[in-house]
Amino acid sequence: MATIIIPTPLRKFTNNTARLNVQADTIAKTVDELTLNFPDLKKHLLDDNGNIRSFVNIFVGNDDIRNLENGDTVVKADTVISIVPAIAGGNF
């Protein structure tokens, strides 16, 4: 099973779980499974059309899925997936 690393700001929607195992063969199916099991995550990860939000970065290993096949990126049993939401704020 692939492992998804949940970032700290989103853990409140996964019962404070930092790592989840999923059985899916693409990123899109992985996100679908994740949001099916944790519906409160859906609005944070997907837009109204069901697409991954532009400010949510998803990595397969060290590679951004935008540089791969986006939602069609293949997920294998030993894949580590990281979700990295954009963080804004602060003063300059």
Image (spheres, rainbow, N blue to C red):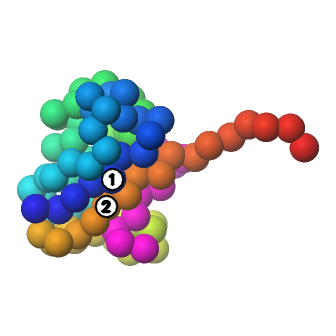
Residue type, numbered disc 1: Ile
Marks 1 and 2: in contact by CB < 8 Å? yes
Q: CA distance from mark 2 to mark 1?
A: 6 Å
Query: Taking 69 as reference, is 71 above or below it?
Result: above
- Give the residue drawn at x 86%, y 38%: 91
Residue plotted at (45% across, 68% down) = 64
Question: What is the magenta range?
Answer: 52-62
Q: Which residue is mark 1?
A: 5
Q: Position of residue 44 (x, y in %)?
A: 42, 33
Task: Please tell me the numbered disc located at residue 81.
Answer: 2
Q: Looking at the picture, tell me which residue is in the foreground, 44 or 69.
A: 44
Q: Is residue 57 left or right of residue 32?
A: right
Q: Nearer the viewer, residue 15 or 41?
A: 15
Helix, strand or loop at disc 2? strand
Within 10 Å of disc 2 (Cα), the crowding (few <14, some 14-19, many 20+) is many
Quadrant location, the C terminus: top right
Residue at position x 42%, y 74% from top? 62
